[in-house]
Amino acid sequence: KFLAIFLGIAYYPTLLLMINYPLDIITDSVKTIADKNIEKNAYVFDKAINQAGYNDDFSSNAEYEKEFNKLYPVIEADDDSFMGSLKSLGADITNGIAVVIQEIISTFLRMVADLALIILNIIRSFFLIVLSIFGIFVIALSSFPTLEGSFSQWLTKYINVYLWLAIGYILKSVLSRVELLANVKEMNQQYE
């Protein structure tokens, strides 16, 4: 037991590297998967906006021309058709403004999520530094009979704090998916 404690103290930096390496792999893998999911959600949202008629390429397709004419009707001089097309134009402008507001809110939520991840990483780094500094003392104190479980408690806390960032990436990906589903549902209700 004392030999294991001595080796733990003597090779403490190596012990930390052995703990950090698989945790880094887990965090990087979760970040990669979350980034791919967020990118896929952004693509689906952009495609939904394009299918709703908010794209720039209307000239090559007759269906796009029809959608363009629906969104931007020609105002005639006749009073009845003028008022009807004006009401139609107002409804289309309102729908367009709703989509723009949704995009602004989505961008704001993404910025808040990125800021939260930065703050989480700063707090996580502080806790990991403190745990790393006191880890060698925990290894030394675990030789006493009343403090035998202190190293396992320290290791559990260290792993938990290390994986905070991975959990933050998962939550950001889930937030992106919920945002996509809410926006697409809202756009489908507007165009039904």
Image (cartoon, helix red, strand yellow):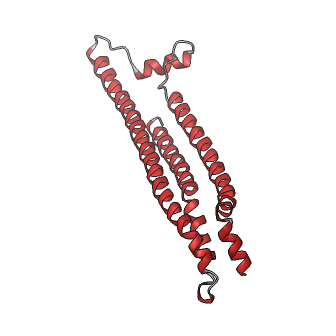
Outermost residue, top side: 77
Give x and y (percent) for residue 30.
Answer: 63, 51
Instruction: Report the side of 110 relative to 154 (left or right).
Output: left
Q: Nearer the viewer, residue 84 or 3?
A: 3
Outermost residue, left side: 79
Give x and y (percent) for residue 124.
Answer: 50, 58
Quarter-of-image position of residue 156: bottom right
Instruction: Report the side of 117 relative to 4 (left or right).
Output: left
Instruction: Report the side of 80 relative to 41 (left or right).
Output: left
* Quadrant of the drawing holding the N terminus: bottom right
Residue at image x 54%, y 29%? Answer: 51
Quarter-of-image position of residue 37: top right
Give x and y (percent) for residue 7.
Answer: 71, 71
Q: How many marks?
A: 0
Residue at image x 64%, y 61%? Answer: 13
Instruction: Report the side of 154 relative to 118 (left or right).
Output: right
- Location of residue 176 with respect to 149 vertically, above or below: above
Q: Nearer the viewer, residue 10 or 123?
A: 10
Outermost residue, bottom side: 145
Give x and y (percent) for residue 182.
Answer: 48, 46
Residue at image x 49%, y 39%? Answer: 188
Residue at image x 65%, y 65%? Answer: 12
Q: Nearer the viewer, residue 79 or 112?
A: 112
